[in-house]
């Protein structure tokens, strides 16, 4: 079981590295550098004018810490075939799961540290919390995260005592109580309570770990966790593990009805329906637009917000390019009395509409973030120029290669 976990972890890390190459491309790294720099500047300026000890600071910090606590899930790396091939070795599964829990705890703890470190200036300047208290808070958070992962592991066993109510108490109510004791009383006391809760939980869970392992539930949890990772990678490149679904979406028929049903819009008709009723490309469009809008809405620096607006329009357009050959495997499209040049023309028209809709929402976010009409005007101008250049030159060149024209 030790070797199995080691091999699984190596394979998992190689898979992550494979797709991270596409995520951390030159464009994205430059964008992240600008984003971090702009956000850091805004954060620094905000701290200089931050009021001290406002009444809502502590409740807001409790909510923030509770949200941070949810980051970092249990990684078991179990696969569907394990329910057959590892079932005879279930008695030795404890060794495998202990290693999985240890790895998950290390990774989750690192993420907890990163987010809490970002909050340290707010706590020390805005709330006048001492450095020693911050250190106790960090260790308290790590203890609570350990509890969270322990309960998550116990859920994978049948007949465990941690049903929905007890899970809510341990992972929801208990942290709120401990945070409140620390912020309104003593951080040392809250840390001691967190340590005691971890010890008590470990003691009570000894018997639960002897119960029958719920393979189906554990594998389902792991597949959902990996699906979330694959969906993130799918924002940047094609991932075979993410399969699109088809949904009727009758409530969007009013959009489809606007596409003229004539010989000039043969492929436009197909692209519009494939995009709206499919989940792969429409999901990418929605996720990237929402992520872009959220980021831009929190950037008060006009030029930086416009830079991100331009970046996200490019990313959305780039992700749409493979959609050009979406119907190439359908033999009936070859019967159309229209050539590839006509198909490219229709795809160009389709992309113009999609990028225009995306630009509308991103510019709304730009105005929310900057609050300046002049910046909104610059954003609209930048959007029009980029969409025009993208569809007229870059899209045509790339789609010709995709369609082997």
Image: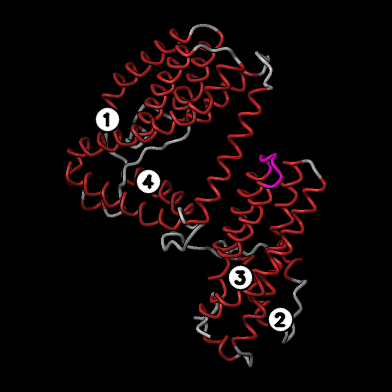
| Cα distance between the residues tagged 1 and 2 | 62 Å
Q: Residues within 10 Å of mark 2 (few under 14, many from 20)?
A: some
241 in relation to 57, above or below: below
Nearer mark to the viewer, of 2 and 3:
2
The stretch drawn in magenta includes residue 302: yes
Residue 40 in the image: state x and y as whole percent: 58, 34
N-term-proximal mark, 2 vs 4:
4
Gap in angstroms between the C-alphas marked 3 and 1: 48 Å
From which residue to which does the magenta span run?
A: 297-303
Please, what secondary structure does the residue beneath circle 2 have? loop
Q: Which mark is residue 209?
A: 1
Of mark 4 and mark 1, the one earlier in the sequence is: 1
Mark seen at residue 274: 3
Q: Residue at x 48, y 20 (%)?
A: 175
Q: N-terminal of the two: label 1 or label 2?
A: 1
Residue 166, image x, y percentages = 44, 24
Disc on res. 222: 4
């Amino acid at each position: 079981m030790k070797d199995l976990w080691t091999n699984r972890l190596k394979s998992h890390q190689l898979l992550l590295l494979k797709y991270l190459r596409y995520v951390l491309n030159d464009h994205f790294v430059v964008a992240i550098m600008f984003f971090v720099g702009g956000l850091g500047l805004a954060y620094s300026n905000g701290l200089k004018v931050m009021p001290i000890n406002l009444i809502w600071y502590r409740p807001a910090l409790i909510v923030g810490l509770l949200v941070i606590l949810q980051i970092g899930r249990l990684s078991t790396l179990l696969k569907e075939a394990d329910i057959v091939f590892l079932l005879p070795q279930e008695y030795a599964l404890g060794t495998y799961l202990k290693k999985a829990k240890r790895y998950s705890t290390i990774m989750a703890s690192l993420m907890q540290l990163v987010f809490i470190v970002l909050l340290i200036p707010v706590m020390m300047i805005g709330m006048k919390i001492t450095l020693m208290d911050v250190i106790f808070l960090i260790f308290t958070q790590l203890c609570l995260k350990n509890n969270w992962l322990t309960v998550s592991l116990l859920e994978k066993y049948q007949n465990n005592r941690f049903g929905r109510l007890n899970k809510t108490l341990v992972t929801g109510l208990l942290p709120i109580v401990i945070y409140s004791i620390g912020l309104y009383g003593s951080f040392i006391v809250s840390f001691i309570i967190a340590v005691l809760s971890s010890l008590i939980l470990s003691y009570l869970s000894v018997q639960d770990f002897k119960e029958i392992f719920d393979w189906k539930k554990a594998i389902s949890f792991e597949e959902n966790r990996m699906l979330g990772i694959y969906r993130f990678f799918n924002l940047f490149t094609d991932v075979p593990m993410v399969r699109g679904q088809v949904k009727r979406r009758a409530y969007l028929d009013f959009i489809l009805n606007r596409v003229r049903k004539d010989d000039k819009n043969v492929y436009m008709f197909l692209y519009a329906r494939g995009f709206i009723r499919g989940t792969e490309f429409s999901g990418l469009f929605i996720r990237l637009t929402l992520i872009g809008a959220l980021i831009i809405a929190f950037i008060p620096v006009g030029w930086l917000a416009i830079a991100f607006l331009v970046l996200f329009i490019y990313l959305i357009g780039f992700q749409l390019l493979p959609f050009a050959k979406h119907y190439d495997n359908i033999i009936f499209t070859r019967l159309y009395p229209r050539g590839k040049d006509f198909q490219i023309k229709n795809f160009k028209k389709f992309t113009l509409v999609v990028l225009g809709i995306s630009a509308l929402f991103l510019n709304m976010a730009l105005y929310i973030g900057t609050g300046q009409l002049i910046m909104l005007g610059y954003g609209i101008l930048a959007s029009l120029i980029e969409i025009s250049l993208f569809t007229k030159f870059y899209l045509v060149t790339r789609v010709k290669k995709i369609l082997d024209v």
